[in-house]
Amino acid sequence: MKSGKILKRIPLCEPEIRGNEWKYIKECLDTNWVSSVGKYVEKFEHCLADYIGVKHAVACMNGTAALHMALLAAGLRPDEEVLVPALTFIAPANAVRYIGAWPVFIDVDPQTWQMDSRRVVEFLKENCDYRRNRLINRATKRTVKMILPVHILGHPVDMDPIVGIAKRYHLKVIEDVAESIGATYKGRMAGSLGDIGCFSFNGNKIITTGGGGMVVTNDRHIADRVRYLTTQAKDDVVEYIHREIGYNYRLGNIQAAMGVAQMERLKEYIAIKNQIRKRYEEGLRNVEGIALPANASWARSICWLYTILIDGRRYGRSSRELMRRLKKEGIDTRPFWHPLHSLKIFKKCYAHKIRIADQLYWQGLSLPSSVGLAAHEQRRVIQVIRDGGR
Ligand SMILES: *Cc1c(COP(=O)(O)O)cnc(C)c1O
């Protein structure tokens, strides 16, 4: 065999299981409470509601289901419109389409990369007409009903202008907090700022249940409605009477047990993610052609995925070339999501003046950010990026 160290692959973002997961899951198996009824489902819901500081939480099968249910419970109907950022994972836009409603794509802020609240206000004020309590998109003639800010990569959206304009036009605000559980905006928790917050516990998120989601709200009526819709809309549990089409979207007790154990570690994981951010900042601060993510003065980011921008001309390689270079070294990275407004499946959707999302898309690269990322592994990532330019 050739000598030399065999370098371990460095994944992008892996689950971290170091607490009571085994214990709580074993308890489910030992007691036969393995389905969607059980004390851990309720416990997990209470844990999250407490943490976010809201009255109600309803566990769902995954984050996409949580978004789907939140939109339905908030009263979204076919052919109505929902404002969604152009630069995000696709789930929120898909959830809008499940209902037969339409996303309206909004550009992102060049500093924070989040849905640009100035563009939201601009679109609603200048491109819509408010008549008889309805806001109509002049271009499509459809009713604008909701705003769906997505807190991407761990950093919150500038929410005050969004919540303000939503109040003025009686729009509902649904926050997608899948990537940013624990992030705060002016000291307040993301997910508690709008009417409804939606969370994901997919395997790549900061805490995970394998697959899982949650809807949180202070509105009892909405919480009841989500609980009803996620359990097949049973109106009479003995006679099986249903007056509406429901869904089987509830979370299982085993997954909830894992969720409770993961919640116990969330604070610690956020602190670790901030360590990771600091090390990247120190290591990459002075690299020509590389821009580091901003942290707005009003924000506490949980640094879900540390993401940099690469100016190909100044750095000497494009983001995609650097991605392939890192891959050769066994280091996983990922570009930004393809901007949604230019995907074929959304070509019938209205897009409002999008420019920044397209620029960021070509430049962005997310770096390994697992809670379990060792300092020496991170040094390897930093070294390849420092050496990888011209
Ligand atoms: C992961 C994610 C979701 C969806 O969560 P799932 O649990 O995978 O369905 C929704 N929105 C955003 C922004 C995400 O990153």
Image (cartoon, rainbow, N blue to C red):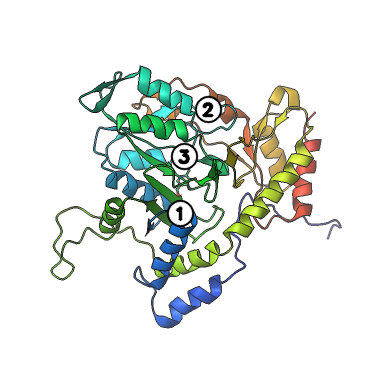
In the rendered image, residue 155, in percent from the top left (x then y), is placed at 56, 41
In the rendered image, residue 23, in percent from the top left (x then y), is placed at 54, 76
Residue 137 position by quadrant: top left
Q: Secondary structure at mark 1?
A: loop
Residue 228's place in the image compared with 172, above or below, is below
In the rendered image, residue 278, in percent from the top left (x then y), is placed at 73, 45
Name the image quarter holding the N terminus: bottom right
Q: Which labelled disc corresponds to residue 53?
A: 1
In the drawing, does residue 200 fall left or right of residue 311? left
CA gap, disc 2 and disc 1: 32 Å
How packed mark 1 is, by other alpha carbons closer than 10 Å (few <14, some 14-19, many 20 or more), is some
Q: Which labelled disc corresponds to residue 357?
A: 2
Q: Which residue is labeled 3 in the image?
A: 150
In the rendered image, residue 233, in percent from the top left (x then y), is placed at 22, 58
Look at the numbered discs 2 and 1 and tell me whether their residues touch, using CB distance below 8 Å.
Answer: no
> For the residue marked with disc 2, what is the amino acid?
Ala
Q: Which residue appears at 47% of the width and 22% of the height?
A: 354
Q: Which labelled disc corresponds to residue 284?
A: none
Q: Residue 133, can we see it?
A: yes
